[in-house]
Image: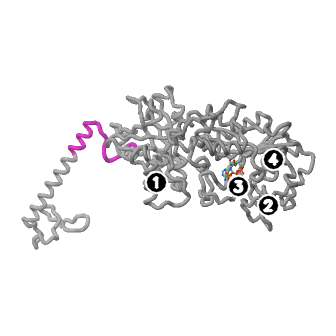
Amino acid sequence: MPRQKDGLPVNSLSGCVRPRSPEGGEDGTISKKAAKKAEAKAKKEAEKARRAAERAAAAAASGSQAQTEDLAKDNYGQETHETKLSPDVVEINLKTLGEEHVGKKVELRAWIQNARMQSAKIAFVELREEGNWSIQDVVAASPEGTPVSRPMVKWVGSINPESFVVVEGTVQKPLEPVKSCRVSNYELHITKCFIHPAAPAVLGMTLAAANRPIANFSDEDVPVDQGVEKLSIASAGEPAGIPAASMLTHLDNIVIHKRSVVQQVIADIRAEMKELYRFYLRYHGFKEFQPPCLIAAASEGGANVFRLPYFEKDAYFAQSPQFYKQIEIAGGRKSVFSIGPVFRAENSNTPRHMTEFTGLDMEMEIKKDYREVLTSSFTCSGTSKERCADEIALVRSVYPSEEFLLPEPGKEVRLTFAEGQKLLREEGPEEFRNKYNTDFYVLDKFPESARPFYAKEDPTNRKVTNAYDLFMRDQEICSEAAYQRPGRAGGADPHQGIDPASPGIKEDVDIFRGGVPAHGGGGIGLDRVVPWYLNLPSVHLAAFYPRTPKRLLP
Ligand code: ATP
């Protein structure tokens, strides 16, 4: 008897496998019931095959791709060292995209801001570069299945937002301007798309929420019910459905916080102001120097210093570069400045305070009058307006503010501390602003009890000092003063409990025993100038990584 491959006997007449099922007869013949079943099955198979053939024919006729092989499989997926774009591709940035790129094959590296499937054959994607430069992208399946196949469309259309991709595509003009993207006159028709490890499907904070004004600056975790209440207050007048997030949520999701355009432009304005400060002082002949951060004793003898183990001794983080600026003057410089970190171990949990901030400090020789000391922050603010007009407008769209009012250069409002206090108390800040038409003013002649021992007293009134503060939108941003050594009352400061013979202070006092010109200077907190200029609700928004008594991360 013939045998089939697996060794089973084959019925010589029918060619059927001898049935083993109970439906088969004892002699190996097929029962009627089994035969009917087999027939029905065969019919079903034949029908299935017929339909598949029909589908294939229809697909071939309409020119659509075969379902089996993905002809575009090399044009998308995870980026690897083998990923290749076309050799003639032009690298672009959205900011500089122009008519010359239309019709060209280009390469763009960007974040997926949004991806959605329009149909099985087409997906729309928004790609975003630094800032809010975004462009609409189309991924459409080609009739031939390459360079873009339907599986590729599905894959691109399903990429998680905030994933980073490298795409190749052709720049085209959309039928009408794309309102949702900053680049509205061009779109990209993607032919290749490779992804760096994808962003998680669920983010701790969405970019839309990160672009909303921050709802709450408390360093404490807010109970959920309270948090919702605060968020809804902050959401008033904002687009519905996008909840604002707290500063804590922002800092816990630092990368998305940084990707928000408002944070990026605040950082740009901050950088610009810092540069303006440097430029302005260099222009006026000031020399830059670098004071140390690690010092042997509390810089101003105060208690607000961070102490750290330093080999067998203790060291401190400098709470001001004051002494070092003065050493530079004593060392033969006419005018100096420094830009660097300043540390304050103050347990102040307010929107005005941080434990680390950037100090813009300057010191200069005084020839005749302590008022010669430059009020440089004033000039920096004025120039920022021209240099950062777009950025300021963008910040205002999230954190509304009125124009920062500045008087004519050289015509700043300067009142004595006593006068200013009286006016502000009696008339209020708004009246004060209307009266003087300024958001920047100087309060001079601070009481000697409110100034460090080395601030020079007013020779005509020993109760006050030749020291003043600069204010922006009614907030102090800078303390300036004329200085003297060894200081009032021979260097001892009864108000601050400083002993001129104490370690650290003594060495500094000794430097100024003689041969030092009269000098004065000041310290501006960059982290305050920026937010008060922009009318932001907290200094924490202007700092890159705010440090507070409760926050050392990230
Ligand atoms: P405050 O009274 O607001 O705490 P201060 O009088 O101690 O400030 P100064 O010692 O005069 O401030 O410091 C000079 C400048 O440094 C201030 O005008 C401010 O711009 C900035 N500054 C001081 N302390 C802080 C802080 N904790 N966080 C951020 N900036 C600060």
Circles 3, 1 touching at the beta carbon (< 8 Å): no
Mark 3: few, some, or many residues within 10 Å (few <14, many ≥20)?
Answer: many
Q: Residue furthest right?
A: 514
Judging from the image, what secondary structure is the residue with disc 4 in? helix
Query: Looking at numbered disc 3 in the image, what kind of residue is underneath it?
Result: Phe
In the image, which is nearer the foreground, mark 2 or mark 3? 2
Q: Dividing the picture into quarters, in which one does residue 193 lie? A: top left
Q: Is residue 534 left or right of residue 319?
A: left
Residue in the picture at 54% in, 56% down: 218
Q: Pointer 4: what residue?
A: 325
Give the magenta range.
53-72
Numbered disc 3: secondary structure: strand
Q: Amino acid at mark 2?
A: Gly
* Apparent side of residue 243 relative to residue 65 in the rendered image (left or right): right
At which x and y percent is residue 72? 40, 43
For disc 3, the marked residue is 343
Q: Position of residue 133 (x, y in %)?
A: 50, 37
Marks 4 and 2, the one that precedes in the sequence: 4
Marks 3/4: CA–CA distance? 17 Å
